[in-house]
Amino acid sequence: MVLFTLVWTLQMLLSFIQCLELRYHNSVEVEKYLTEISQNYSDFTHLYSIGKSVEGRDLWVLVLSKYPKEHRIGIPEFKYVGNMHGNEVVGRVMLLQLIDYLTQGYGSDSFVTRLLTSVRVHILPSMNPDGFEASERDCYNTVGRYNKNGQDLNRNFPDAFSGNEEQGQEVEVQAVMKWLKTEMFVLSANLHGGAVVASYPYDNSNGGSELQNDASVSPDNDVFVHLAKTYSISHARMFYGNVCNDVNFPLGFTNGFYWYALAGGMQDYNYLWGWCLEITLELSCCKFPPESELRGLWEDNRAALLAYIKQVHLGVKGQVLDANGTPALNAEVKVMGRNNLTPYRTNMNGEYYRLLLPGKYTFRVSLAGHEPLTETLSIPNGTEQFSALTHNFQLRALETPSSGSQSSASPELKQYRYSCTMLVAQLILLACLLCSF
C-alpha cells in the first residue's frame, strides 16, 4: 500500500510538471519550469543561458532534440525567440506551451518524435525578461516594451542598409549576436504581438535594387514568401488577413518594409549576417490579452508553430570537401542568380544548409587554393521526408605547373614567351653580323 501511494504521488508530480498551466508565468517561475523540464527529460532536452539581461536575469534557452547537447552533422538548427518586446507576451506563453507539447509528445506522438529526431529546436521564451516584469496588463500601451535601459531591442541590431556598426548594442542584443556565431541556425522566427500577420525581410532599404514596388525584396524572396504563407495558412485565422479589423494583409503575410520601414531589426540581421532565414510572427491584436484568451490563442497557433519548424527541411544540405577529402571551413556556396549581400559559407565541419523551394539550381562553390566547382542540382521538397536533399561538393586543387613547364600556361603567356624567345634570337643574330664586320 505504501509503495502504491509513492508511485501514485510520483505520477501526480510528473503530471504536474508536464502539464503547464495556461497563464502568465513570471521570470522566476519560467526558470523553475525550464530547469525541471531539463532535469526530468534530460535524454532529449538541454537548458543553457546565452547571457543576462540588464537587470541580471538569465536569457534561458531550452533545446529539444534527440541530440540535445551538441550539434550533429546533417541535423539542422532551428530557433524560436519570444518576448523581445517585454509587453508583447503571447509569444512567451506560446513557446512555453510548445515546450510542454513537445516534451509530452516525444516518444509517443509519431510526428513530434520524427520532428525532434531530425532537427535541434532551440527555444528562447523571453529575450526581454526585464521588460516583461515591468509590463502592465494593457493591450496598447508601451510600458515594458523596452529593456531596462529604455532601448527597443528590435531597433538595436547592426543594419546593413543604414551602415550601423557593431557597437553600442544592448546586452540582450549582444547575447543574440554571439548566439548566432556559436550555432549555425538555418531557420528562425521571433514572436510579437499587436497584430496578426507573418512578416518577412527585408524590413529596411537604402533605395537600392532591393526596393521593388514599395517592398524591400531579398534574393530569397520566394522562400520567405513560402515561409510566411506556411505559418499563415496553418494558423486558425491569420490567413483571413484582417483579424484585427484595422489593416488588411492579403492571405495574412507581408513584406516587412512594405508594412513599415524598420532599421536595426533582428530578422534582417539574422538573414544578412547569420545566414539564417527569420520571419516575424505577430500573434495577437492585444499585446497583453486577458488570461482567459490564452487557450484559444494556443489552439490558433499550435499547428502553425509545428508546421513552421518542419520547413527547416527545405532545400539542400551537405558538406564541402577539399582536395584531400577533408571538410572545408569557410568555403563559399553560391546559388547562381541569388546575389546575397553576404555569401553563404561553410562552418567548421564543412557544412552548408540552403533553404530553397523545389526546382533546379546551379551552385558555384569556391575555396582558396581550389578550382571553382559548378554543379546543377534538382531539389525536391524534403519537408515530407523530414530531411533536405543531402549533397556533398568535392573540390579539386588548383594545378601548379612545374618549373619550366608550359603545359598549363595560358595562350597569352605562351605568346609572350614566344615573342621573347624570337627577340633574343634576333639580337644574337644581329651581334654575330656586327662581329663579322
Image (cartoon, rainbow, N blue to C red):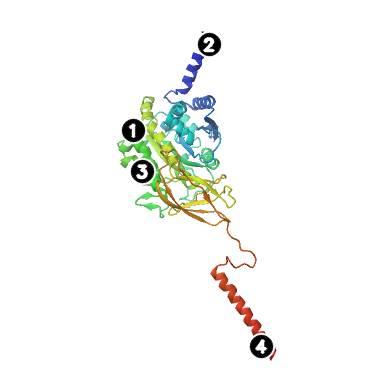
Which of the 4 quarters of the picture holds residue 69?
top right
Cα–Cα gap, marks 2 and 4 = 118 Å
Q: Residues within 10 Å of mark 4 (few under 14, many from 20)?
A: few
Cα–Cα gap, marks 1 and 2 = 46 Å
Foreground tag (1 vs 4) = 4
3 or 4: tag closer to the N-terminus: 3
Relative to 404, does residue 63 appear above or below in the rendering? above
Foreground tag (3 vs 4) = 4
3 or 2: tag closer to the N-terminus: 2
Relative to the observer, which residue lies in front, 399 or 247? 399
The amino acid type found where label 1 is placed reads Ala
Residue 161 placement, left or right of 322 = left
Secondary element at tag 4: helix
The amino acid type found where label 3 is placed reads Thr
Secondary element at tag 2: helix
Q: Which residue is mark 3?
A: 254
The amino acid type found where label 2 is placed reads Leu
Residue 294: x percent and y percent? 38, 27
Relative to the observer, which residue lies in front, 117 or 82? 117
Residue 107: x percent and y percent? 47, 27
Q: Residues within 10 Å of mark 1 (few under 14, many from 20)?
A: some
Cα–Cα gap, marks 3 and 4 = 84 Å
The answer to whether marks 1 and 4 mark residues whose Cβ atoms lie closer than 8 Å is: no
Cα–Cα gap, marks 3 and 2 = 58 Å
Cα–Cα gap, marks 3 and 1 = 18 Å
Residue 8: x percent and y percent? 49, 14
